[in-house]
Image (tube, rainbow, N blue to C red):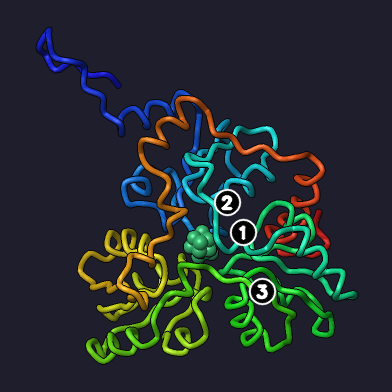
Amino acid sequence: MLESSGSASAAPKFDLVDEILALKKSRNAVLLAHYYQEGDIQDLADFVGDSLQLSQAAATTNADVIVFAGVHFMAETAKIVNPDKIVVLPDLEAGCSLADQCPADRFADFIAAHPGHKVVSYINCSAAVKALSDVICTSSNAVDMVNLFPKDQPLIFAPDRNLGAYVQKQAGRDLVLWNGACQVHEVFSERKLIALKVQHPDAVVLAHPECEPPVLRHADVIGSTAAILNHAVSSPKSTFIVVTESGILHQMRKAAPDKTFIPAPPEANCACNECPFMKRNTLEKLHAALRDLQPRIELPEDVRQAALRPIQRMLARDLTAA
Ligand code: 13P
Ligand code: SF4
């Protein structure tokens, strides 16, 4: 809302947060934010969650407009399940290095090279890759989705080799893995993590399954962002080393202000534990997206329909759905 300062000559004060809230209401928009967004965006969101929770929220919303404070594949998933709604992503360049490592044409060749295999794809992929898949999974349900298939069914798992290796171990079955990885989760340093554990012997290590196996070996709890947040809040322990993107610390500190959360360090002295794609969204871009209803996510209808089926199977936890 535009505010008057009380002085006739002063320029009206523009309050970005008030403006966003007012636009959200007038547009009948819902703001969905991933845990890796900046804290100021998370605090304005109608719903903050991990990839599975956000896709469930997108599938059930009554809003006319979905503003997705996350990355492209997340907003694309929201559009796939809501073809008649306007879906905007504050910055269209908010991509994902993992999704980019699996181009649909090369993935189609990979599938063709493995006849008889069904395809389980992590939600961190393009709509075109989803369209080639039998079922989609997220980090919170990947083991369950793999276990929906009979034990003797050969499976391809793509595009994250680290999540795939973790699922392989948990499900106790072989998977053909696509060789992709997240540029944020693969930079955590095993050496520095061990040093941190020596410094904080009582700390619980919480890690995301996108991390590499040498790092996951030192984790006490491995789970999606929502799972490790829930563990941190409900645990009687007071100190946690957090091995995932640092945006999650915002909700951890809000939910458990008396506990200590230590972000695990990357190998280099950099802020590489921040996802540069997630961090492209800002309050200013969010405001512009609500005001202009741009940039929108649009998809060819044939790709959308083909990508919808494996998403519906995930949401229904049923391979015969869709
Ligand atoms: P989750 O939201 O499933 O924890 O995955 C994290 C992630 O890397 C999203 O890009
Ligand atoms: Fe992609 Fe990794 Fe960023 Fe998630 S954290 S959006 S997987 S680059």
Mark 1, residue position: 100
Of labels 3 and 1, earlier in sequence is: 1
User: Closer to us: mark 3 or mark 1?
Assistant: 1
Look at the numbered discs 3 and 1 and tell me whether their residues touch, using CB distance below 8 Å: no
Q: CA distance from mark 3 to mark 2?
A: 20 Å
Amino acid carrying label 1: it is Asp
User: Front-most of 135 and 265?
Assistant: 265
Rendered residue at 78%/69% (across/down) = 119
Rendered residue at 50%/69% (across/down) = 224
Residue 140 occupies which quadrant of the picture?
A: bottom right
Horizontal and vertical percent position of residue 72? 57, 49
Which mark identifies residue 144? 3
Amino acid carrying label 3: it is Asp
Horizontal and vertical percent position of residue 27? 49, 26
Using residue 312 as the reference point, say whether residue 241 is left or right of it.
left
User: Closer to us: mark 1 or mark 2?
Assistant: 1
Q: Cβ(mark 3) to ligand 1 < 8 Å?
A: no
Horizontal and vertical percent position of residue 260? 23, 73
Of labels 3 and 2, earlier in sequence is: 2
User: Front-most of 245 and 147?
Assistant: 245
Q: CA distance from mark 3 to mark 1?
A: 25 Å
User: Closer to us: mark 3 or mark 2?
Assistant: 2
Rendered residue at 46%/65% (across/down) = 226
Query: Element under label 1?
Result: helix
Mark 2, residue position: 74
Rendered residue at 82%/71% (across/down) = 118
Of labels 1 and 2, earlier in sequence is: 2
